[in-house]
Image (spheres, rainbow, N blue to C red):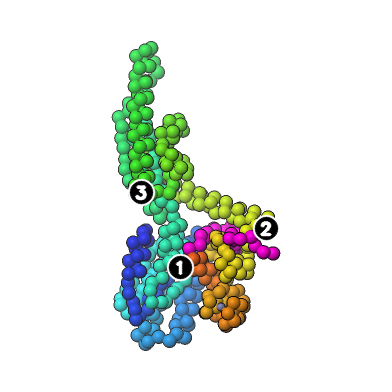
Amino acid sequence: MKFTNSSQAEALAQIKTHPLQATSFYLNTDKSEQNLKAINAAWKGIVNQARIGLEKRELTKEAKKSLLEDLEKISQFCTNRLNGFKSPGLAIFSCSAINFWQEFELPHGPRNRLVQDFDFYTRPLYAILEKFKKICAFLVNRREAVWYEIYMGEIKLLDSLRSEVPKKVKKGGFEGYESKRIERHIENLLLEHFKKAARRTFEILKTNNFDWLFIGCDDQFYPDVEPLFHTYVKNKIKGRLKARPGTETSRVLEECLALEEKLKKEEEQELVKKLVSELERGGRAVSGLPETLRKLNAHEVQHLVITHNFSKPGRVCPECHSLFLTEEICTACQVKTEEVADIVDEMIEVALNRSLPLTQVSPPSKLDHYGHIGAFLKYRSAR
Ligand SMILES: [Zn+2]
């Protein structure tokens, strides 16, 4: 099933598996970033690690059996289905003892991970929801207007409008005063059509809470249409489309997704640029894993910026949850730290728990030259 809205994540959160435990599994299956061989190696590694981890855990026989069965089913699913799997991400939620199994095709590649706990681990689903913009595509020509909603890679027709505006009078057909009068009449009808469409755009944007507005309109009409929009609408305009009323829906979707991707990439690059300039002038920013970890532990991070899929093993203090790269003893409470497979993942977890803004940047970017990770700080870094 495709993952498209928050109610799917909420439904998972409602399921109680206590005293048994549940398995949540996330896999980046984006074949534009990696080949099938790499994807297969990734899930096998995660599932094996979970099996080994399960051996060490103290659980009832029944609970362990259910979790092992989950791992077995996930292995089977991946073996049989990944070859033809089209979505960039996969999530599986399983609790064999109560016969629960749910798989989602995700519109964006998640960080790979497998969690076995009392609840289903749904936070990455919410992170995906937040990543996507809700876009309205407004397409208009001299007779028609259509509105689409584009969200999470899907398109939905919202409304359409048709006005009776006659074609322009051919030159030579009429002459003098009469011809001018008719032309003016047609222009008024056209203006009425654009006004109606602009009003409806305002209503649609207001009721549906869109983030962005894309407009498909001929250059000759755009200067007439744009001034008719309410300021609220004008502030949402993020780009122009080649699509017009009558363009095939799949083509509209394709164009909108490409533009969304381009705009998001620009936003990311802009943020990295800001981070780099802050770093260069010794301002409120740090970069590199060791420094960023230190600042996160000290509660000084304001906004975390991470290269998508950047990952490194590390250590966590079981007492105070401080994060480290190599320290065997926690510097804060002197307790022995425990190994974790991915310290970056733990940082993301901390950021989400503290409601810190977090941006994952698609590589390549300038961030690659700064250790793939950095943060804006609440205070100037002491050097
Ligand atoms: Zn500690």
Farthest front residue?
379
- Mark 1: secondary structure: strand
- Mark 2: secondary structure: loop
Mark 1 vs mark 2, CA separation in Å: 38 Å
Taking depth in this image into account, of 35 and 130 the one nearest to the observer is: 130
Question: Given the image, on which type of amino acid does mark 3 rest?
Answer: Asn
Q: Position of residue 144 (x, y in %)?
A: 34, 35
Mark 1 vs mark 3, CA separation in Å: 31 Å
Question: Given the image, on which type of amino acid does mark 1 rest?
Answer: Leu
Q: Is residue 215 above or below residue 365?
A: above
Say whether residue 11 is left or right of residue 365: left
| Residue at 57%, 63% in the rendered image | 301
Q: Which residues are magenta?
A: 355-383
Q: Is residue 344 above or below residue 173?
A: below
Say whether residue 193 is left or right of residue 298: left
Question: Given the image, on which type of amino acid does mark 2 rest?
Answer: Gly
